[in-house]
Image (spheres, helix red, strand yellow):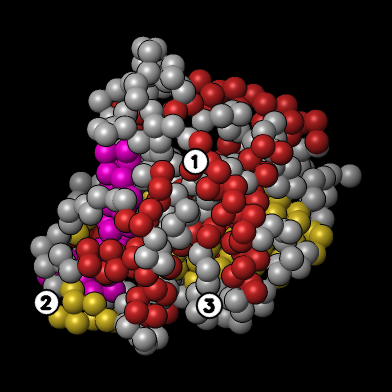
């Protein structure tokens, strides 16, 4: 007998089909419309503390050199990996989020200063854990305000505090703008600028967490740090930050949900799982009939919302092709077996395990992308939320975690053990072959003929 809230195969297929049709309509709204909706602040209500902060851009221009050096070193000097625009350094908005105990779901945000709210947030947090959260949204939608319910729940389950970074969105801010922003935010956590509300965060108690595109961004930041270690030939690299040389450490772990490390959508599972995921058969933003807007197409036109097409096979854009994960902190990864990008997740985790990184892999049979948000009543959703929080706490507390892999089956949620070193038969040559074929055939979007759907 299935557990309460655990859907059967027929229920899953029907629910995913309905969600896919609804999402398809949303995906055909213009980029400007979708981005505007996803960044709108609807206010704060309920049991959560929100303390807004803006990290300054002054005194950190050298971070651009750190990013461009990593792009160069990880790109192996290939000319195709030099086709990007170096973004300016800008101030980065972010939100501290914590669980606010003892209030109803309709409780309004208290009239307090941001500093007072941060103090109250830390007083309600009973753990030393800090989570740096990378939100999803395919790099062109999303915001800290939109993700408040998600990160507040994670704060509740972990008893810690969360910082959600408001990184710049594509297509108007293509790679590496978002990477520059999260690097700046990470350093500000470790080394607070003058007049900050928070004290320095100990990286031993700091976790990177994220979902969907946010997982890719978090892994890109890890690759940047590992690359800087190699460039400086030390396990404790330094960077000039606000006038002083500071260390650039790794966090204590990563807790990643709905991993999306391939930005081409070209691996076999993208096609094999076409009817089991919430994405339609093709992403419409490149279709000749997709509605043009002020943000898309770009000038000059591109064939990818996030980056130049020539950069899609770079490890800082698509971490799936990273040649090494040696030295990476332990990672917990959960993904649905029905997700179209599951092949990339399997390949990356397998390579990390082979590089002796501690990895905990959880694959939920038949689950689609973002199932924990779309279907919160399902037993699989409740289970993955619990395990996600437990992984954050375990890494931050320095508990000994061994590598393991499992597939959570439909029905009773029985776990079937799998070897994390043999999750897929794909090889690097296969992955690069699929991705580069996509790069050769994709055409830039030059403007749609349809009107934007409002």
Tell me where residue 293 appears, x and y as whole percent: 29, 22
Whether residue 234 is visible, yes or no, is yes
First along the sequence among labels 1 and 2 = 2
| Span highlighted in magenta in the image | 167-196
Q: Nearer the viewer, residue 346 or 417?
A: 346
Residue positioned 74% across, 65% down in the render: 422
Q: Which corner quadrant of the image does residue 387 belong to?
A: bottom right
In the image, residue 387 above or below residue 398: above
| Mark 1 Cα shell of 10 Å, populated few (<14), some (14-19), many (≥20) | few
Q: Which corner quadrant of the image does residue 89 belong to?
A: bottom left
Q: Nearer the viewer, residue 107 or 297?
A: 297
Q: Nearer the viewer, residue 52 or 179?
A: 179
Position of the N terminus by quadrant = top right
In the image, residue 447 above or below residue 213: above
Q: Is residue 194 magenta?
A: yes
| Mark 3 Cα shell of 10 Å, populated few (<14), some (14-19), many (≥20) | some
Position of the C terminus by quadrant = top left
Q: What residue is disc 1 on? A: 440
Q: Which corner quadrant of the image does residue 114 belong to?
A: bottom left
Tell me where residue 204 appears, x and y as whole percent: 42, 79
Closest to the camera, between mark 1 and mark 3, is 1
First along the sequence among labels 3 and 2 = 2
Circles 1 and 3 in contact, beta carbons < 8 Å: no
- Label 1 – label 2 distance at C-alpha: 44 Å
Residue positioned 74% across, 31% down in the render: 13
- Give the residue furthest to the right: 1
Residue positioned 64% across, 49% down in the render: 342
First along the sequence among labels 1 and 3 = 3
Q: What residue is disc 3 on? A: 326
Q: What residue is disc 2 on? A: 243
């Amino acid at each position: 007998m299935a557990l309460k809230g655990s859907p059967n195969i027929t229920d899953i297929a029907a629910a995913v089909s309905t969600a896919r049709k609804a999402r398809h309509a949303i995906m055909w709204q213009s980029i400007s419309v979708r981005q505007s909706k996803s960044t709108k602040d609807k206010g704060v209500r309920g049991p959560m503390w929100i303390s807004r902060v803006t990290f300054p851009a002054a005194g950190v221009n050298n971070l651009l050199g750190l990013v461009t050096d990593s792009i160069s070193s990880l790109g192996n000097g290939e000319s195709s990996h030099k086709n990007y625009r170096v973004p300016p350094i800008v101030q980065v908005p972010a939100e501290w989020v914590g669980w606010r105990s003892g209030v109803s779901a309709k409780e309004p945000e208290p009239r307090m200063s941001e500093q007072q709210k941060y103090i109250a947030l830390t007083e309600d947090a009973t753990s030393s854990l800090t989570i740096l959260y990378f939100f999803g949204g395919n790099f062109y939608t999303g915001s800290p305000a939109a993700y408040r319910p998600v990160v507040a729940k994670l704060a509740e389950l972990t008893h810690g505090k969360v910082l959600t970074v408001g990184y710049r969105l594509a297509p108007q801010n293509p790679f590496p703008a978002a990477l520059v922003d999260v690097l700046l935010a990470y350093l500000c956590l470790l080394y607070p600028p003058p007049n900050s509300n928070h004290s320095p965060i100990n990286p031993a108690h700091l976790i990177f967490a994220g979902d969907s595109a946010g997982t890719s961004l978090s892994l890109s930041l890890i690759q940047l740090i590992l690359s800087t270690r190699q460039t400086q030939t030390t396990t404790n690299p330094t960077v000039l930050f606000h006038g002083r040389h500071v260390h650039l450490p790794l966090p204590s772990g990563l807790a990643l949900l709905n991993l999306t490390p391939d930005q081409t959508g070209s691996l076999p599972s993208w096609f094999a799982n076409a009817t089991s995921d919430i994405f339609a058969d093709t992403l419409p933003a490149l279709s000749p009939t997709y509605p043009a807007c002020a943000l898309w197409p770009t000038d000059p036109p591109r064939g990818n919302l996030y980056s130049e097409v020539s950069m899609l096979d770079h490890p800082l854009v698509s971490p799936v092709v990273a040649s090494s994960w040696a030295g990476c902190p332990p990672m917990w990864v959960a993904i649905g077996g029905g997700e179209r990008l599951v092949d990339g997740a399997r390949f990356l985790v397998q390579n990390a395990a082979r590089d002796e990184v501690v990895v905990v892999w959880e694959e939920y049979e038949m689950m689609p992308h973002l199932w924990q948000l779309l279907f919160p009543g399902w037993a699989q959703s409740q289970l993955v939320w619990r395990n996600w929080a437990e992984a954050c706490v375990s890494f931050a507390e320095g508990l000994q975690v061994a590598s393991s892999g499992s597939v959570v089956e439909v029905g009773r949620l029985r776990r079937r053990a799998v070897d994390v070193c043999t999750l897929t038969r794909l090889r690097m040559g296969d992955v690069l072959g699929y991705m580069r074929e996509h790069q050769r055939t994709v055409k830039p979007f030059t403007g749609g003929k349809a009107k934007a759907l409002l």
